[in-house]
Image (cartoon, rainbow, N blue to C red):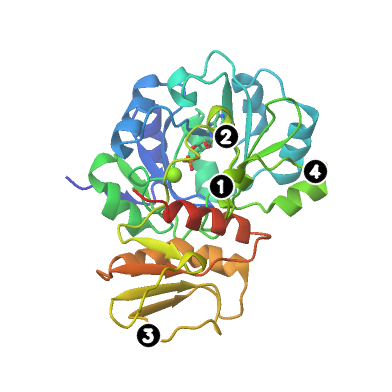
Amino acid sequence: MTSEVGTDIRKAAGILRDGGLVAFATETVYGLGGNALDVNAVARIFEAKARPKFDPLIVHIHDTSQVSELVQTVSVPATDLMERFWPGPLTLVMPKQNVVPDLVTAGLPSVALRMPAHPMAMELIEQAGVPVAAPSANPFGCLSPTRVEHVADQLGNHIDYILDGGACPIGVESTVVGFPDGSPVLLRPGGLPLEEIEAAIGPVQQIAKGEVSDNPSETIEATPQISPGLLSRHYAPNTPLITRDEELEIDVSKLRVGLLTFKSGNDVIGFTAVEVLSEQGNLVEAATNFFVALRKLDNLSLDLILADRFPEYGLGRALNDRLHRAAKKR
Ligand code: AMP
Ligand code: MG
């Protein structure tokens, strides 16, 4: 059985209210949504994605009036960030109310909240009348879906309805910020650049920085306790992927090697296939194309995908983070 794909928001909202699962477009990637307050619906999300229960879900809302229902206290920096960046690709982790099932938060006392900046997602959540728990609409650990066909291909028979909202404009997941000791900590780089957050609220601690470091000893081991799910291999194609700077002695002409590269002008000789993410080297455009391009290369039965790193600023931070995890050994 394959899922129905359409644009009927009313129908999709009804399915969510009745405990069903709906995939929907957001500005970051497609989400697989269920009623966040219905533990059975939430359990179905984990099952559909084969997602480990230690990896908590982000709860999506359409109005800040829903925050007090889900969160105990909102700190000053969190309030500032909501006012400045919601709706948008920013997830905030805050102390949860009892009404949020432990399954949503993987037993943590905090819940991750986001208000997506996508008209269909907003309308869906409003009509459903419930907060919507939604991880990306893909099997756990695989490439994130940024087009409706990615969802249909990968999860098609596990979902009650797929709401077609077109291509996701940002193309990488939300930035996640928590406040474990009161001050802001970047838990995952994402669609909202760190620079913009720091311009709004001042310095943000970068606990996830070790994730993109070339030196494994710099990885901050506290990360799993604060934000489980961040250290796992993730966002990964089936084809082995390495970044160009960790290239071993590989003769690309003897193997079928695909290249994922940021902009034109990088060395592309000898590759079986080349995906240039942004001719002019624009990080916003590169992010939009990132998962689509990686998917294309992954579908070519290549021996290897070689990826060029991005500059470590703006959306480049999120893209390097995704590359780093895609390159982790199984
Ligand atoms: P995604 O897999 O894109 O849905 O992103 C969810 C990620 O957000 C998880 O893997 C966690 O790293 C983080 N997250 C979600 N909820 C929490 C929470 N309650 N506390 C800390 N991090 C969280
Ligand atoms: Mg995901």
Q: Which residue is mark 3?
A: 270
For image coordinates 53% across by 49% down, the residue present is 173
Mark 4 neighbour class, 10 Å CA radius: few under 14, some 14 to 19, many 20 or more:
some
For image coordinates 26% across by 40% down, the residue present is 158
Residue 125 drawn at (x, y percent): 51, 36
Mark 3 neighbour class, 10 Å CA radius: few under 14, some 14 to 19, many 20 or more:
some
User: In terms of sequence position, does the residue under pointer 3 or pointer 4 come before the other?
Assistant: 4
- Determine if residue 49 is in view: yes
Q: Inspect the image, locate mark 2, and give the three-letter code of the amino acid beneath it.
A: Thr
The reply to whether callout 3 and callout 4 are in contact (CB within 8 Å) is: no
At mark 4, the secondary structure is: loop
Q: Which residue is mark 4?
A: 203
Residue 124 drawn at (x, y percent): 48, 40
Rendered position, 193 above or below 217: below
Q: Which residue is mark 2?
A: 223
User: In terms of sequence position, does the residue under pointer 2 or pointer 4 come before the other?
Assistant: 4
C-alpha span from label 2 to label 3: 39 Å
**272 displayed left or right of 288:** left
C-alpha span from label 4 to label 1: 19 Å
